Amino acid sequence: MTLSRRSLLAAGAAGLALPAIRPAMAQAPLRFCLDWALQGNHGMFSLADDRGIFRQNGINLRMDRGFGSGDTTVKIASGAYDIGYTDVSTMVKFNAENPDKKIVSIYQVLDRTAAALITLKKSGISTPKGVAGKRLGAPEGEGSRMLFPAFANVAGIDAASVKWTSMAPNLRDTMLAQGQVDAVTGFLFTTYFNLVGLGTKEDDIVAWPYAENGLDIYGSAVVARADWLEKNPQVAANFVKSSIAGLKLLLAEPDAAMASLKKRESLFDEALEKRRWFMTRDRSILTPNVKAGGTGVLDQARGELLIKVNAEAYGVSNPPKFADLFTDRFLPPQAERMLG
């Protein structure tokens, strides 16, 4: 059952003990780290920046690429960045082990995780269970790899039999295409279109998104450290407001968003990235939950499921509570979050 805004605000306030939001100081410098190299869905941030939306809300944005959700989570915790965009599943174990550096999701951008198990027809793997005993590849800090044990639990995969191969992030999909590994974990829209870009025929790609195969949980979110939020509540609220405005721009003007990303990365493939964005939009953003409750809507049962499966997979005996991991305190009113 979807929580009311009032109950979530109360839970968030109890869990975070945040002060009342105060007027923002102009042009607050803000260091923002993405989860990966620039991709189509990141256009919500770049186009909002180009159109001056962040600046209008008192934020001077510095946006850097990421190297995997796990890596971004660590960087936010260390204070290297103020705000990050990362898979919220990476935060369960981290928060349990680092209560003094607790990280909080302040805006759930992906209502459904984009994590997936992906292979090619030539591997002979025809079901998720078929990956048992095979060579499975992913970077060590990559969010879908960190979530794989939880997916294995619900999909009936013998996770202990999987032979992991670690590699640099930019080599994962190439190694799959070349047959150096039998399957990989990764965000569906990342690996799928990387394979297409490498010349793989789309009919040869086989994928099992976690959310569509028994693990329907939240995906990537805008996050920040709890102690940073205590000191910068208005900056956080303005960042979320700007991001939502950017998402609306991305939905309405995908070509302009791709062009804004191209300005930041000369090798950015606008046509391919627009297709990647459309997959992200349709499978992880414009879900029934979002259509009914607006972008960023939270459901306590789904949040608790995410915490539970991650805690079980990693043997976490003291998992964070829902109100310590999620808050809607920094979201604008529902009417401003409806995506049409």
Image: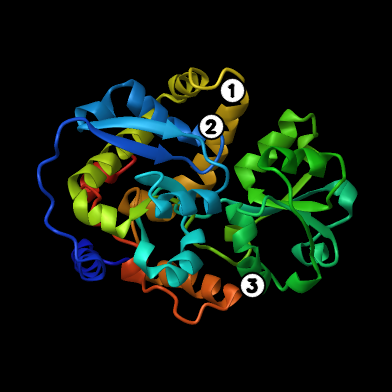
- Foreground mark, 3 or 1, reads 1
> Which amino acid is tagged 3?
Val
Which badge, 1 or 2, comes first in the chain's sequence?
A: 2
Label 1 and label 2: CA atoms lie apart by 8 Å
Q: Are marks 1 and 2 in contact (CB under 8 Å)?
A: yes
Which badge, 3 or 1, comes first in the chain's sequence?
A: 3
Q: Quadrant of residue 340?
A: top left
Which badge, 2 or 3, comes first in the chain's sequence?
A: 2
**Callout 2: helix, strand or loop?**
loop
**Callout 1: helix, strand or loop?**
loop
Residue 162 horizontal/vertical position (percent) = 79, 65
Residue lying farthest to the bottom in this orientation: 317
Q: Is residue 9 above or below residue 82?
A: below
Q: Is residue 160 above or below residue 261?
A: below
Disc 1 target residue: 268
Residue 73 horizontal/vertical position (percent) = 47, 53
Q: Is residue 312 above or below residue 181?
A: below
* Residue drawn at 62 percent across, 40 percent down: 190
Q: Quadrant of residue 192?
A: top right
Disc 2 target residue: 38
